[in-house]
């Protein structure tokens, strides 16, 4: 018999088998100590998805959808990507409804590969979702962090500036190849006791981990008062642990670890 086992006598083979068994037992004990007691996961139903909104342009009106993909970059429904467009000043600083309240009156949707903007008596305007590469990339500032966005052109910039009746604004589009803002960098701005104590939730096949609670409440968007009346809205930031799809009617579960 060839090989290392074939060259050993019966006594030596028995010693080798015993040593191997001890090594295996030691490895199992080490793995058990390292892992510790296993926790069980229990689902506790806490609600139901009643409505889903995607907000293509930050601070503008949202689009109600029945079904959406949950990606690491936020909700997606076809060409609709959550907050992939941003209004900025010419120096790159973002513009929100706090600075320009009329932004909440701008409706944004996607049709046939174009972002469509409508507001008041303004003529609707469209911008290609896939912008020409010749459009310059602008360096922007969002909540103290640097990001990039591709400029959507002079026509839509003038449209937004005219409607807001403000100093010159630009519209930029975030592309997946660009480096996004890191949500973990904003954690220090909030307190862990600001709101709920939920840690993990399950909706459909999507799992999310709570990161931080909103620092304060805000009154609802004027366009949504028929839904919320004068009640304040509270929220919590979640990071996506497992991507998937959610839809209206899905149960919402709190994941309880025991």
Image (cartoon, rainbow, N blue to C red):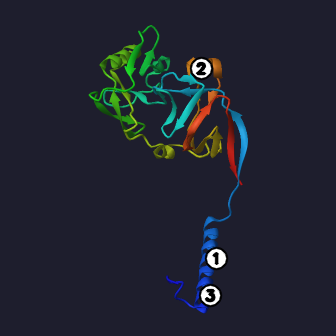
- Relative placement, left or right, of 54 versus 115 is right
Q: In the rendered image, which quarter is residue 165 located in?
A: top left
- Return the residue at label 2: 224
The crowding category of the residue bearing disc 1, from other C-alpha atoms within 10 Å (few below 14, some 14 to 19, many at least 20), is: few
Secondary structure beneath dot 2 equals: helix
Distance from Cα at disc 1 to Cα at disc 3: 17 Å
The residue that appears at 42% across and 28% down in the rendered structure is 85
Q: From the viewer's side, name the closer residue of 178 and 213.
A: 178
> In the displayed structure, would residue 140 be above or below residue 1?
above
Residue 49, position as x, y percentages in the image: 66, 31
Residue 180, position as x, y percentages in the image: 41, 40
Distance from Cα at disc 2 to Cα at disc 1: 63 Å
N-terminal-most mark, 2 or 1: 1
> In the displayed structure, would residue 47 be above or below residue 219?
below
The residue that appears at 63% across and 79% down in the rendered structure is 21
- Return the residue at label 1: 25
**Residue lying at the far left of the rendered structure:** 134
- Relative placement, left or right, of 207 versus 189 is right
Q: Quadrant of the C terminus?
A: bottom right
N-terminal-most mark, 3 or 2: 3
The residue that appears at 67% across and 33% down in the rendered structure is 250
Distance from Cα at disc 3 to Cα at disc 2: 78 Å
- Residue 229 in sight in this render: no
Q: Do labels 1 and 3 touch, CB within 8 Å?
A: no
Q: In the rendered image, which quarter is residue 172 located in?
A: top left
Q: Which callout, 1 or 3, points to the residue nearer the camera?
A: 3
Q: From the viewer's side, name the closer residue of 246 and 187.
A: 246
Residue 137, position as x, y percentages in the image: 30, 32
- In the picture, the disc for residue 14 is 3
**Residue lying at the far top of the rendered structure:** 121
The residue that appears at 62% across and 81% down in the rendered structure is 22
Q: From the viewer's side, name the closer residue of 60 and 256.
A: 256
């Amino acid at each position: 018999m060839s090989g290392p086992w074939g060259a050993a006598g019966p006594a030596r083979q028995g010693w080798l088998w015993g040593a191997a068994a001890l090594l295996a037992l030691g490895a199992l004990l080490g793995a058990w100590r390292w892992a510790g007691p296993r926790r069980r996961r229990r689902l506790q139903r806490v609600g139901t998805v009643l409505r889903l909104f995607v907000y293509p342009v930050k601070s503008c009106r949202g689009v109600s959808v029945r079904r959406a993909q949950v990606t690491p970059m936020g909700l997606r429904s076809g060409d609709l990507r959550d907050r992939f467009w941003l209004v900025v000043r010419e120096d790159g600083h973002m513009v929100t409804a706090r600075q320009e309240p009329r932004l909440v009156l701008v409706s944004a949707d996607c049709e046939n590969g174009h972002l469509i903007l409508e507001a008041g008596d303004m003529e609707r305007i469209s911008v290609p979702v896939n912008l020409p590469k010749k459009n310059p990339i602008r360096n922007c500032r969002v909540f103290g962090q640097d990001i990039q966005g591709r400029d959507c052109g002079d026509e839509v910039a003038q449209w937004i500036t005219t409607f807001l009746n403000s100093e010159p604004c630009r519209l930029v589009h975030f592309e997946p190849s660009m480096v996004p803002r890191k949500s973990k960098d904003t954690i220090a701005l909030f307190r862990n006791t600001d709101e709920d104590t939920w840690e993990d939730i399950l909706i459909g096949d999507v799992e999310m981990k709570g990161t931080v609670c909103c620092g304060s409440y805000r009154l609802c968007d004027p366009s949504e008062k028929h839904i919320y009346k004068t009640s304040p809205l509270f929220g919590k930031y979640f990071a996506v642990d497992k991507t998937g799809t959610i839809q209206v009617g899905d149960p919402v579960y709190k994941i309880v670890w025991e």
